[in-house]
Amino acid sequence: MPPRKLHATTPDQQRLFQRKAQLLPWIANPLHLFLHHEASHGHAHQPLATTEGQAEHKHHKTSLSSAEAIYEEVEAEEAEPSELFYDLFFVANLTTITSVHYMTDYSSMVSYILFFILLWFTWLQTTLYDIRFTSDSLYERVIRSVHFAVMIAFASVSTSWNPLDPSLPSARNNLMSMSLTLMASRIALGIQYAVATVYASKTFKKGILPLVIHSVTMFAAGFAYLGLYFTFQGSPAPKTYIAWYGIILIEVFAVCTSSSIWNVLSFKHTHLVERLGLLTLIIIGEGIIVMLKAVNAVEKGSTYGRGWTASIFFIVACAVGILYLLYMFYFDYTPRNVHYGTIRQQFWAVLHFPFHLAIVLSVEGLRQLSTWWSFQQANRLITRRFEAAANSTDPQVSWENTLSEIQNFLQYLYDDGTAKDVVKNWDEIQTELANLKKTPYDSMTNQTMIDVYQLSFDMISGFAEFYGIKVPKSKSNLNPANQIMGVYNMVYTYFFSALAVVFFMYGILGLFVRRKKDIWDYFSVALRFAVAFTFIGLERMKANPAMYVRFMSSPWPIPTVAIILFVALFVDKVVGLFAYKRMHASMSYHR
């Protein structure tokens, strides 16, 4: 067992401990764990200590001896492997829904959010049980397999998820499947809480009533989901799925409220903070997977299109840097070994829902914008090639050259081994091209122009999807280029709006981390709010069409975000270092 960590024993010492934990040394001894282990067993000399370190150690020993009776142990057990395995199912679902559910309009984005709500709160309810009551046994492993099956069911439903359009053939089956999935999850949790209640009746009398409330809540929710299952059997399916989200609110309220009233079932001494931190890490890590898709799209376009240029490389590097900076903003301000109240901790946990949702939308927008500049550069190159082909004084020659360019380009897309599904209806396209080549320029008909338009649509749509840009299906005869621009107008909006929410949540979560705050803590929170308002200002750039078009036509949207985050983090670290030194000097003076 590793040696017991030393903890601060007074509020001021806790604040000093937290503030110091946020600071980064220029370089640290990579052997510190070995030296600590050896020293604790008396097999090595203690490393030389500075005067400051000796003073801290001496004061800390005194504090421990005098305050041991009032010291509140906040260190919790680490997450079990089965819990981490369950988290992997969560991220697998998140990756699946992101890869198959393209956000091409606001309806598809809302549909994505509705799925994320169900997935996240199912994970939360399972986690709230695990961190308090899980123990390895055959029974627990069987129940765990049910929760794994629930996650697999989520994945199966995600492939054609669209509850906003109940007229779709798959909508009814998906809604019915989701209701059964939610029912299975809550019934399993109800059984687990019921078993815990039986054991509490023998040795833990104070926990009986809150455990009964937990169990009854889960069973009631499960049967409510079962009842909603039967409402979807009509055609088209009614919108009674809205009741799911009301039931979820009741579940969270019942579990969190009863855990607050009966402190014996609170989340003290649990690894809730660790689990939420791990989930945050997983969600940001999913952003890395998403970014690799963007890199793959850029690489695929490197042969016929512009491919890797200095600007594209810089944009991809900034996108990856943004993910790293988001990671640092969260984990450098997450509480370590400090208890900050049962109710406060529960609010802190639930507030991770909007935070995680905003992170997911941010990284998806980041992927889309990462390929936008590559698509623009390659599109300009292709446009110039078509202009060159058409640059002939002989209309017939220009017509034949243009058709040859279209055929070569579509063939290039179709021949790519990783993009076989990009060019749809390939046989029909080949037939249309053959017919158009037989048609002289001076004998074109309306049908000929329709065929040319269809080929142009297939070419532009195929090229966009080649770069990971999903062109929305539309019944109108809109130019696909305008449809693509419409998608990116939406991406721009939700990307910067989600980033603003992320930093508002950084600030709000920061307020929950500290019980006793000083001016430097408030400055840190205000800095995050300032970054959030900056992103709102960038999103509102759309109000000035000329400025917005110039900004979107440049390589600067992603580098601008990276620069803002880097400057904010640098200022935060400098101010944090200054605050720590002042606080440390003040405490040393009063010793």
Image (cartoon, rainbow, N blue to C red):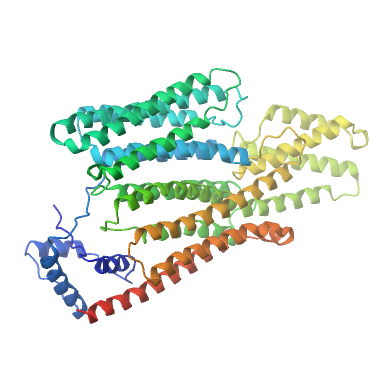
Question: Which quarter of the figure is the C terminus placed in?
Answer: bottom left
- Is residue 501 or residue 412 the one in the foreground? 501
- Is residue 559 or residue 167 the one in the foreground? 167
Taking the view exactly as shown, the residue that stands out farthest to the left is 42
Above or below for 162 versus 48: above
Query: Picture coordinates of residue 573 (x, y %)?
Result: 40, 70
Q: Which corner quadrant of the image does residue 439 belong to?
A: top right
Query: Picture coordinates of residue 240 (x, y %)?
Result: 53, 27
Above or below for 219 versus 48: above
Q: Residue at x 46, y 55 (%)?
A: 505
Q: Left or right: where does residue 466 sit relative to residue 390?
A: left
Query: Does residue 409 appear in the picture of this structure?
Result: no
Q: Left or right: where does residue 219 sit relative to residue 76?
A: right
Q: Left or right: where does residue 314 sit relative to residue 67?
A: right
Q: Left or right: where does residue 162 sit relative to residue 23?
A: right
Query: Does residue 127 appear in the picture of this structure?
Result: yes
Query: Picture coordinates of residue 518 (x, y %)?
Result: 37, 70
Above or below for 478 versus 342: above
- Is residue 458 or residue 220 the one in the foreground? 220
Taking the view exactly as shown, the residue that stands out farthest to the right is 442
Q: Residue at x 14, y 74 (%)?
A: 58
Q: How many marks?
A: 0
Query: Picture coordinates of residue 494 (x, y %)?
Result: 58, 50
Q: Residue at x 47, y 31 (%)?
A: 244
Above or below for 181 versus 569: above
- Is residue 255 or residue 532 the one in the foreground? 255
Q: Residue at x 14, y 58 (%)?
A: 3
